[in-house]
Image (cartoon, grey):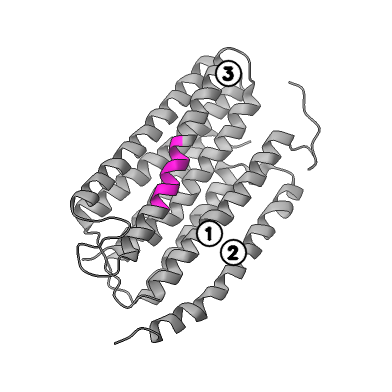
C-alpha cells in the first residue's frame, strides 16, 4: 500500500479530509441542536410527544441497531486491513443491513407520527408547532446522513470487492459511519428523552 | 491497535450509558439537572466513540490538536444564544 502525502504527520490525506468534513458537519449538527434548544427555552407552550411505549422503546431499538452497525463497521475495517477480503465484505454487508434497518424504523416512526397529526407546522396536542419543526428537521438531517452512508458503504464495498480500492478507503468510510453514530448519541437524549412524558 | 474484545467492551459500555440515560429521563429530575446529566453522558459516549471507534487514540496527537479544539471552541461560542432565548419567553403576550 502506498501512503499518500499528508499534511498531518502520518495521517493519509483522504482520512484527514474526512476528518475536516466531520468537524464541519459536527458544527452543522451543533448549530441545529443549539437552534432546537433556543426555540425550546424560548417557548412557553412546548409539548412532550413521546410516551415510553412505543416511541422511546423504538428509539432505544434504533440506538442499539446503530451502535451495532458501528461495531460491524469496525470488524469490516479490521478484516480489510488484515487482507481478509471475504470477511470484510460480509461485515460491510451487515453494516449496510443495520443501516437500512435503522432507516426503516425511523421512516416507520415518521409515518406513525404524521398519522397522529404531527408535521413541521402542526402539533396535534395544541402546543407549539416548533416541536414538530425541530423534530423533523433534526431527525431528517440525521436520516439523510444514514441513507448517504449506506450508499457510500455500498459503493466502497463494490470497489473493494473488485480490487479497485484498498483498506484505507474502507477505514475512511468507517470514520464517516462512526460520526453518524456519534451524532445520534446527542440526538437520542436531547430530542427523544427530553421530550418523553411519563 | 485495539482488539475485537476491546471493541465489544466499548459497544457494551455505550449501550449501558444509553440505558442509564433512559432511566434518568423517567426519574422525575428537574429539567436543568436532567439536561446536564444527559449532556455529560452524551459527551462521555462521544469521547469513547472518538477515541476507540474513530481511532483518535491511535492517531498522531497533531490530528487531535488540529481538529478537536476548533470544534469545541465553535460549540462553546454557540452558548451565547441562551440569554436571548430566556429574554424571548418574557416577550410572549399573555
Side of A182 where A66 appears, left or right: left
Span highlighted in magenta in the image: A138-147
Q: Magenta region's main secondary structure?
A: helix
**Badges 1 and 2, same chain:** no
* Residue A146 belongs to magenta span: yes
Q: Tell me the crowding category of disc 3: few under 14, some 14 to 19, or many 20 or more residues within 10 angstroms, Cα based.
A: many
Residue B54 location, x and y as percent?
59, 42
Q: Please report, as a chain letter, where disc 1 is located.
A: A
* Pick the front one: B89 or A168: B89
Q: Earlier in the sequence, mark 3 or mark 1?
A: 1
Query: Which of the numbered marks, if any, corresponds to residue A160?
Result: 3
**Residue B36 appears in the figure:** no
Image: A115 above or below A36: above
Please give the name of the residue rendered at 44% of the width and 39% of the height, measured from the top-left corner.
A146
Locate residue A193: give its quadrant.
Answer: bottom left
Q: Tell me the crowding category of disc 1: few under 14, some 14 to 19, or many 20 or more residues within 10 angstroms, Cα based.
A: some
Say which element carries label 3: helix
Image: A44 above or below B19: below
Image: B32 above or below A10: below
Residue A189 location, x and y as percent?
38, 59
Quickly name the residue at label 1.
Answer: A30
| Callouts 1 and 2 close, C-beta under 8 Å | yes
Amino acid at each position: 500500500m502506498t501512503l499518500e502525502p499528508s499534511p498531518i504527520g502520518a495521517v493519509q490525506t483522504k482520512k484527514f479530509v474526512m476528518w475536516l468534513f466531520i468537524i464541519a458537519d459536527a458544527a452543522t449538527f451543533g448549530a441545529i441542536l443549539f437552534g432546537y434548544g433556543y426555540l425550546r427555552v424560548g417557548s412557553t407552550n412546548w409539548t412532550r410527544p413521546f410516551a415510553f411505549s412505543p416511541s422511546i422503546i423504538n428509539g432505544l431499538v434504533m440506538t442499539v441497531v446503530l451502535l451495532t452497525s458501528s461495531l460491524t463497521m469496525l470488524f469490516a475495517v479490521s478484516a480489510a486491513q488484515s487482507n481478509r477480503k471475504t470477511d470484510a465484505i460480509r461485515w460491510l454487508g451487515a453494516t449496510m443491513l443495520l443501516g437500512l434497518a435503522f432507516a426503516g424504523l425511523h421512516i416507520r416512526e415518521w409515518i406513525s407520527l404524521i398519522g397522529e397529526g404531527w408535521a413541521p407546522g402542526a402539533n396535534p396536542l395544541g402546543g407549539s408547532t416548533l416541536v414538530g419543526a425541530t423534530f423533523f428537521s433534526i431527525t431528517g438531517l440525521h436520516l439523510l446522513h444514514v441513507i448517504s452512508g449506506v450508499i457510500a458503504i455500498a459503493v466502497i464495498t463494490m470497489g473493494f470487492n473488485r480490487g479497485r480500492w484498498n483498506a484505507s478507503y474502507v477505514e475512511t468510510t468507517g470514520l464517516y459511519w462512526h460520526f453518524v453514530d456519534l451524532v445520534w448519541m446527542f440526538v437520542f437524549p436531547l430530542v427523544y428523552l427530553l421530550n418523553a412524558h411519563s | 491497535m485495539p482488539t475485537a474484545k476491546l471493541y465489544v467492551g466499548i459497544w457494551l459500555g455505550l449501550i449501558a450509558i444509553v440505558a442509564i440515560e433512559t432511566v434518568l429521563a423517567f426519574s422525575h429530575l428537574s429539567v436543568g439537572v436532567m439536561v446536564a446529566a444527559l449532556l455529560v453522558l452524551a459527551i462521555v459516549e462521544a469521547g469513547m466513540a472518538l477515541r476507540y471507534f474513530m481511532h483518535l487514540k491511535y492517531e498522531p496527537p497533531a490530528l487531535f490538536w488540529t481538529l478537536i479544539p476548533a470544534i469545541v471552541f465553535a460549540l462553546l461560542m454557540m452558548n451565547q444564544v441562551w440569554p436571548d432565548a430566556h429574554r424571548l419567553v418574557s416577550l410572549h403576550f399573555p
